[in-house]
Amino acid sequence: MYRDTVDLYAYFRIPREGRAGGYLSVTVPECGSVAKKLRPAALIFPGGGYNFLSPREGEPVELQFLARGYAAFRLDYTVNTPHPVPLLEAAMAAAYIRERAGDLSVGPLVAVGFSAGGHLAGTLATMYGDPYIKEVLGERNVRPDAAALCYAVLTTDYNTHGGTAQIISGGDEELKKQLSVVERITPDCPPVFLWHTADDGAVSVQNSLRAAEKLAACKVPFELHVFGSGVHGLSVCSVETADDENDVRVNPAAAQWLPLLFTWLLSRGFAVRKA
């Protein structure tokens, strides 16, 4: 197993300016005498309302992707800081994976985000051509090949999570509108997988429903799964991300999002291949 932690600001020689995040955890399976493989890459953004990074949506998610042969990259992005800092760090992470693809033997890239991390993955999938990104990173390719948005904050105006919208916009109402992922969806967006629970009490299912409606209107390939019940922040829905076996976060029905996602990704070319 190859592991590393990359300071993206140092790698790209960008002034850090006191930002606490921008660190990318890299984990790539290596199987000794087994033939070298070209692996899909998962870039994972934990949630936390842009206020903190949820441990439930970090390492446990990485392990799920590693178990299926993916290379896993988890971004510890700067929190309590408005746009464009988190998006720039997400773009740096994508650019790093693209630049190191040959060395790390990785292929297509899926951005995977949860709650506020889903908002970040969604902004990367819709705002990858943002002038600020190009100003800092030039013409580097930061567009993911797919996005998986998990009970994500995808609107900043209607049925949204107020804390997420407030922090990422810095309270600027016009910027808040501009950072609605639903409003940024165009036909040029990569394919999207969405899942939510119908009774999510923190981030309304309307976020995923409205995103699906816009994706359909733009003819962007997508798949949407809404599970009947489940609290916010389910992550992988197992005892590993719950307090104990009796915790409501153990949700076998909603846990089906993982095999559904991997089947969908496989249909879109995310396969482990001989290098």
Image: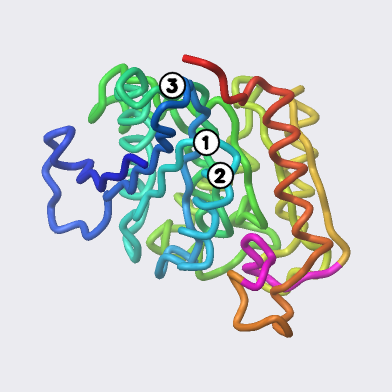
- The residue depicted at 78 percent of the width and 62 percent of the height is 197
- What amino acid type should be assigned to the residue bearing mark 2? Phe
Residue identifier under label 2? 65
Prevailing secondary structure class for the magenta stretch in the rendered image? loop
Q: Is residue 152 above or below residue 259?
A: below
- The residue depicted at 88 percent of the width and 64 percent of the height is 228
* Image location (x, y in percent) of residue 6: 23, 44
Residue identifier under label 3? 36
Considering the numbered disc 1 on the image, is that residue within a helix, a strand or a loop? loop
**Around disc 1, counting alpha carbons within 10 Å, would you say few (fewer than 14), some (14 to 19), or many (20 or more)?**
many
Residue identifier under label 1? 70
Which one is in front, 63 or 260? 63
Q: The N terminus lies in which quarter of the figure? A: top left
2 and 1 marks in contact (CB < 8 Å): yes
Q: Which residues fall within the magenta stretch?
A: 229-239
Considering the numbered disc 2 on the image, is that residue within a helix, a strand or a loop? helix
Q: Is residue 109 above or below residue 212?
A: above
Q: How is the image coloured?
A: rainbow
Marked residue nearer the N-terminal end (1 or 3): 3
Which one is in front, 271 or 77? 271
* Image location (x, y in percent) of residue 175: 45, 50
Closer mark to the observer between disc 1 and disc 3? 3
